[in-house]
Image: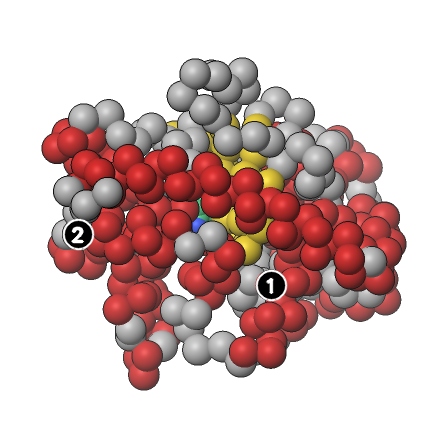
């Protein structure tokens, strides 16, 4: 993808999305986001970013953060993000993200940041480290997006509020300085946007899960681990495979199965009519293993080919920096920084 010059309009709409390297990505991230990222490349120009700067709002072990960032980026390629068509890089490699974030901080109010449910949530979980970065997290996210003047931002439902504040900041800035930023729209994937924990189906499957690994299918689990986690998945009372509010465990497994096989809920109910939970859970586990097998293979090959992945990271960051600089120069000029 080339930086858009003033004279040459982009033919396709532009997309940006980010994923934090805060754990090994989980099946929920795959179904809700990552596999859409790959599919979107057919229709859009795409910029994908491993947001390592967002990750340090919580305390991280440096070696672990470095490894998780690398694994996340490698996994993105294994999942079908094609570096020939899309940009894929680390947020910290393009300094424009931090620069724009500072400027946008000055156009964002404490009150609006204080209303963010993710901030309230994370600060209640990490009372010993309620840092300013955690508070201004949505401003950095807005900078990620506005830097590239993208049209669409694929996100999960939990990022709805952050997307709203990003739009508010863009509109506010444009109202003062003229049309500087494209005001982006959120893009919500079609199916299975929300995959829940296998043991506690009333909360989201979390890639940062550490308390009980059986809650989460990590994309780099091996086949036996995946099958055993599904065998242990919490089901509900009764024995029928039925999609219903009073059956959150079974319904979640059905959502996973449906997302991976394309079958509808009534088709799944018919398929497992009278089969019992044991057989159903095994079938879901096997469907997940079949989906992940080619990804594991590709991940292994890519991990062995360090030079190739290094090249992707470098080339993408260079192109992203060139695009970012166009916006950043405009913004700096507007606010009155000397040329
Ligand atoms: N905050 C997002 C999340 O937790 C990750 C993210 C950072 C992001 N910057 C972004 C997503 C820009 C979309 C666009 O999922």
Disc on the earlier residue, 1 or 2: 1
Kindly identify which residue carries mark 1. Answer: 69
Quadrant of the image containing the N terminus: top right
Q: Nearer the viewer, residue 339 or 234?
A: 339
Q: Is residue 142 left or right of residue 314?
A: left
Dot 2 lies on which element? loop
* Number of disc labels: 2
Residue wearing tag 2:
106
- Position of 254 relative to 326 (above/below): below
Q: Please name the residue shown 44% across and 78% down the image.
A: 59
Ligand 1 lies under 8 Å from the Cβ of mark 1 = no
- The residue sitting at 32% across, 83% down in the picture is 128
Kind of element beneath mark 1: helix
User: Is residue 277 shown to the viewer in this render?
Assistant: no
Q: Is residue 222 left or right of residue 179?
A: right
From the top left corner, tell me how far across and down residue 277 is, in percent: 76, 55
The picture places residue 34, in percent across and down from the top left corner, at: 62, 45
Number of residues whose C-alpha sits closer than 10 Å to that of mark 1, classed few (under 14), some (14–19) or many (20 or more): many
Q: Quadrant of residue 21?
A: bottom right
Q: In the rendered view, would you say 238 is above or below 67?
A: above
Report the Cα–Cα distance between label 1 and label 2. Answer: 29 Å
Q: Nearer the viewer, residue 191 or 273?
A: 191
Quadrant of the drawing holding the C terminus? top left
Q: Residues within 10 Å of mark 2 (few under 14, many from 20)?
A: few
């Amino acid at each position: 993808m080339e930086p858009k010059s003033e004279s040459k309009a982009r033919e396709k709409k532009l997309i940006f999305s980010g994923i934090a390297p805060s754990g090994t990505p989980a099946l929920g991230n795959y179904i809700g986001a990552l596999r859409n990222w790959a599919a979107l490349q057919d229709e859009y120009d795409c910029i994908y970013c491993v947001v390592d700067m967002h990750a340090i709002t919580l305390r991280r072990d440096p070696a672990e953060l470095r490894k998780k960032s690398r694994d996340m980026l490698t996994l993105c390629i294994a999942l079908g993000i094609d570096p020939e068509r899309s940009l894929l890089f680390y947020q910290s490699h393009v300094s424009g993200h931090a620069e724009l974030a500072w400027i946008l901080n000055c156009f964002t109010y404490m009150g609006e940041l204080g209303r963010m449910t993710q901030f309230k949530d994370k600060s209640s979980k990490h009372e010993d480290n309620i840092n300013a970065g955690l508070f201004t997290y949505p401003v950095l996210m807005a900078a990620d997006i506005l830097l590239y003047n993208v049209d669409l931002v694929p996100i999960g439902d939990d990022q709805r509020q952050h997307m709203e504040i990003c739009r508010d900041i863009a509109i506010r800035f444009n109202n003062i300085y003229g049309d500087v930023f494209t005001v982006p729209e959120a893009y919500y994937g079609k199916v299975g946007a929300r995959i829940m924990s296998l043991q506690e189906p009333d909360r989201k499957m979390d890639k940062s899960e550490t308390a009980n690994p059986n809650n989460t299918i990590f994309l780099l689990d091996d086949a036996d681990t995946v099958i055993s986690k599904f065998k242990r998945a919490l089901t509900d009372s009764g024995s029928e495979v039925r999609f219903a509010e009073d059956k959150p465990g079974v319904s979640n497994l059905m959502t996973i199965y449906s997302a991976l096989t394309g079958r509808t809920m009534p088709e799944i109910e018919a398929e497992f009519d009278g089969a019992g939970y044991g057989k159903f859970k095994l079938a879901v586990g096997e469907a997940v293993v079949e989906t992940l097998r080619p990804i594991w293979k590709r991940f292994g090959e890519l991990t062995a080919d360090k030079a190739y992945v290094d090249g992707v990271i470098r080339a993408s960051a260079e192109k992203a920096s060139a695009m970012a600089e166009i916006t950043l120069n405009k913004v700096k000029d507007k606010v009155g920084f000397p040329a």
